[in-house]
Image (cartoon, rainbow, N blue to C red):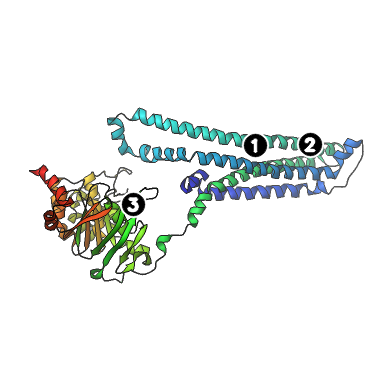
């Protein structure tokens, strides 16, 4: 709701702009009042019949001015009630807003989705759903506009009546010689400006008030305490060779989940270890990694770094200890070097070195600008890379970080067999003496690791070396043998 509210309001800058316009409306009302002061203080000439005496009275001017202000504040109050109805409509429309955002962000804005749309003839299905969402949004917008127009029309009618009375009073005074022709023009202009300023103030007040409601959830979100930033202990002073991370009875449940994704996990990770994390889909492997990196917080238990809860360490420094290639990694429309270094400043020689280690240097050399060539077709010289090439660049990024812990989540899933063999055979050279956690469904990768952890249903079922687990003839042996049969 915070994100949708921020978008619906136009953002804080748009809100600030409208607030400035509202202040300008107040200034216009004050200016009109200053111009009208002479006619308010003018000596009365009560001649003629009762009606003419009333029109010539200075009190009628006061009354007109007060009626303008009263109508303005009355319609501000009415606008407030109308805004409440509009906000209720907006809250009903959150689902449609999110769906519309999804269609634009994930489908219309990504040319890569065109392959699936064409191959599976998804156009009609997508158009049906998109049209349904857009019709719903248009209906919601019509309901909101209907409320706004009803308020605006009523106010305009009242303003028109007040202007007719105002012009009549000024005209009568001009005819009776109480004011000159030039003054008639001046006062008519001032009253017109007053009416216009009051009208604009009502409109802008309504807009600002409604946008304050839209931004309410956004402000609430900004006020939430950052639980991840509570610790302050430095990690930079910890000797890498002494680093030990311990999972102490850790459980985790995703928001809205019915059961724990991880249950009572007890594990220890030592610096320099090469660990394989295996198990069926949904076993909790990636969840464990997200907890290890402190991207998630345990719902039960705690994670320790050298015997101290990781929440006591500086969050940014703790994150700097990990170089990760996630299964759903992302590269960005920046240069190859900036993607690898994650910075504008980098050592070109080191960039080339890690690209060579990851087996992608030869491809980068063929690009027109080498490591300075932008990725993806968002610029004139942007280069599209294949899934396997992108994965190698992501591996190079993890290596360049020189973090003491390297985590590779399915790092060779998009690589061809030869490229995968090269990564496996140079695994120790790539990782060097750092701790590495390696997640893969390709069981052959486990042979390169010193310890294998088997997860199933969120629990650690087995631990040991490849030989120990094969001899145990448990889950790991079953998975190994099932995959080995495909190569016989």
Label number found at residue 173: none
Find residue 356 and report its image quarter: bottom left
Q: Residue at x 50, y 43 (%)?
A: 8
Disc 1 and disc 2: Cα gap in Å? 20 Å
The residue wearing badge 3 is 260
Using a 10 Å C-alpha cutoff, classify the residue at mark 3 as few (fewer than 14 neighbours), some (14 to 19) or many (20 or more).
Answer: some
Callout 2: helix, strand or loop? helix
What residue would you read off at disc 1? 152
Q: Of marks 1 and 2, which one's residue comes earlier in the chain?
A: 1
- SS of the residue at dot 3? loop
Of labels 3 and 1, the one closer to you: 3
Q: What residue does disc 2 label?
A: 165
Q: Nearer the viewer, mark 2 or mark 3?
A: 3
Q: Nearer the viewer, residue 310 or 406?
A: 310
Where 95 falls versus 331 (above or below)? above
What quarter of the picture does the C terminus occupy? top left
61 above or below 446?
above
- Of labels 2 and 3, earlier in sequence is 2
Residue 116: tell me if it is visible: yes
Sequence-first tag of 3 and 1? 1
Residue 30, image x, y percentages: 71, 50
The answer to whether residue 383 is left or right of residue 297 is left
What distance separates the C-alpha of mark 3 from that of mark 1? 54 Å
How far, Cα to Cα, is label 2 from label 3? 73 Å
Instruction: Residue at 37%, 57% (x, y): give it.
Output: 299
Q: Position of residue 168 (x, y in %)?
A: 80, 35
**1 in relation to 163, above or below:** below
């Amino acid at each position: 709701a915070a994100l949708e509210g921020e978008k619906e309001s136009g953002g804080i800058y748009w809100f600030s702009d409208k607030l400035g316009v509202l202040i300008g409306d107040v200034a216009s009302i004050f200016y009109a009042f200053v111009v009208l002061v002479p006619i308010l203080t003018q000596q009365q000439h009560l001649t003629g019949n009762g009606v003419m005496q009333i029109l010539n009275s200075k009190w009628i001017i006061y009354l007109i001015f007060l009626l303008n202000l009263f109508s303005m504040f009355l319609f501000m109050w009415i606008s407030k009630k109308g805004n409440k109805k509009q906000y209720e409509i907006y809250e009903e429309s959150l689902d449609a807003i999110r769906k519309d955002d999804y269609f634009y962000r994930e489908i219309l804005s990504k040319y890569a989705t065109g392959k699936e749309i064409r191959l599976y003839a998804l156009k009609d299905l997508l158009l049906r759903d998109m049209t349904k969402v857009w019709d719903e949004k248009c209906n919601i917008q019509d309901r909101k506009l209907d409320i706004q127009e009803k308020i605006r029309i009523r106010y305009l009618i009242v303003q028109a009546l007040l202007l007719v009375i105002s012009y009549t009073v000024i005209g009568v005074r001009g005819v009776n010689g109480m004011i000159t022709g030039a003054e008639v023009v001046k006062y008519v202009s001032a009253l017109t400006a007053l009416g216009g300023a009051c009208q604009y103030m009502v409109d802008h007040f309504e807009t600002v008030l409604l946008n304050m409601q839209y931004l309410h959830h956004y402000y609430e979100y900004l006020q939430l305490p950052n639980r991840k930033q509570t610790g302050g202990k430095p990690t930079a002073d910890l000797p890498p060779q002494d680093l030990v991370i311990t999972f102490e009875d850790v459980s985790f449940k995703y928001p809205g989940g019915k059961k724990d994704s991880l249950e009572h996990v007890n594990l220890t990770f030592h610096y320099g270890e090469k660990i394989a994390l295996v198990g069926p889909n949904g076993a909790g492997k990636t969840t464990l990694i997200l907890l290890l990196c402190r991207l998630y917080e345990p719902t039960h238990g705690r994670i320790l770094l050298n015997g101290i809860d990781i929440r006591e360490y500086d969050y940014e420094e703790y994150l700097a200890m990990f170089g990760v290639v996630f299964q759903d990694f992302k590269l960005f429309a920046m240069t190859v070097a900036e993607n690898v270094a994650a910075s504008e400043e980098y050592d070109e020689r080191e960039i080339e070195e890690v690209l060579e280690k990851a087996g992608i240097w030869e491809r980068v050399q063929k690009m027109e600008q080498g490591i300075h060539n932008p990725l993806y077709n968002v610029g004139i010289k942007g280069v599209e890379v294949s899934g396997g090439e992108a994965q190698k660049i992501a591996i190079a990024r993890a290596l360049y970080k020189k973090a003491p812990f390297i985590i590779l989540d399915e790092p060779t899933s998009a690589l061809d067999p030869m490229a995968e063999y090269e990564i496996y055979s140079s695994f120790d050279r790539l990782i060097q003496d750092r701790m590495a956690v390696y997640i893969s469904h390709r069981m052959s990768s486990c042979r390169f690791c010193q310890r294998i952890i088997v997860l199933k249903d969120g629990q650690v079922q087995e631990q040991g070396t490849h030989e120990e687990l094969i001899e145990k003839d448990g889950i790991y042996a079953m998975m190994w043998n099932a995959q080995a049969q495909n190569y016989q």
